[in-house]
Amino acid sequence: MSIFKRKKHLETNSMDNGVNIITVSAPNSVNTEQFNTIRTNIEFSNADKQIKSLVLTSATASEGKSTVAANLAVAFARQRKKVLLVDADLRRPTINATFNISNPIGLTNFLTGHSISINDIFYKTTVENLYVTPSGPTPPNPSELIGSKRMEKLIVALQEAFDLVIYDAPPVLSVTDAQILATKVDGTILVVRENKVEKEAVKQAVGLIQHVRAKIIGTVLNDASGVAAGYYGYYGKEK
Ligand SMILES: Nc1ncnc2c1ncn2[C@@H]1O[C@H](COP(=O)(O)OP(=O)(O)O)[C@@H](O)[C@H]1O
Ligand SMILES: [Mg+2]
């Protein structure tokens, strides 16, 4: 038996090249329509209160969190909502690459440097009404930063400044960041990639989110062969 644990190879394509924003490159496609449907489902998921902040997470890496987060952000922005997409996956960020932002100032700069204001960390994109906050340089203590008081205050401030804030978070089974964020927003969406993740892992992820009493408002099934003529399915919370 080897004493060395084999390190799992994690895909880095979306960190290097960004994710595919099909809602922009193919606005009339079936996939764009599916993202619009997911948007509508989210809007109607809570009758009592308008959803103003969302966390997107998954059980494991590379299930499509960043892809779904970016496309959903576009779908909401197209409804004339002022939307902010925040790269809260500090270990595997994608937003700089996806939106071609060359300025590295982002979330971690705000959380560690007191001279940086909230206005310094969001950027306009080519999509009207859509703004993004990149992760900033990777810190040695990501979970500590995500769990900090300063992060908590930022979440409240951003919710005031935008109609909707979407946090692209790390996977639940790797680190605690998504669980922490989930407790501070209006709703959590679990992205599940078909044929990529074991059912048991998804169950564990749901358990961890529920354990902190966060609210899962729905699940997005990514890369789904069973969904007619497309890739994305949405399942609301069972009533
Ligand atoms: N439905 C899909 N069809 C094909 N490729 C996809 C799909 N969803 C995601 N990908 C690809 O899978 C990789 C991981 O996606 P990403 O959104 O970065 O996942 P995560 O943020 O969960 O790590 C990327 O290269 C992305 O382009
Ligand atoms: Mg990602």
Image: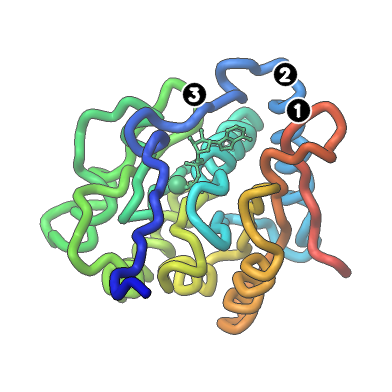
Of helix, strand and loop, which one carries label 3?
loop
Query: Looking at numbered disc 2 in the image, what kind of residue is underneath it?
Result: Ser
Q: Tell me the crowding category of disc 3: few under 14, some 14 to 19, or many 20 or more residues within 10 angstroms, Cα based.
A: few
Provide residue 54's location: percent of width, then percent of height.
57, 56
Residue holding disc 1 = 33
Task: Please name the residue shown 80% across and 54% down the image.
Answer: 235
Q: Is residue 150 visible?
A: no
CB under 8 Å between discs 1 and 2? yes
In the image, is residue 185 above or below residue 192? below
Of helix, strand and loop, which one carries label 2?
loop
Residue 7: quadrant of the picture: bottom left
* Image label count: 3
Residue holding disc 3 = 127
Q: CA distance from mark 1 to mark 2?
A: 6 Å
Provide residue 95's location: percent of width, then percent of height.
38, 38
Quadrant of the frame with the C terminus: bottom right
- The earlier-in-sequence mark between 3 and 2 is 2
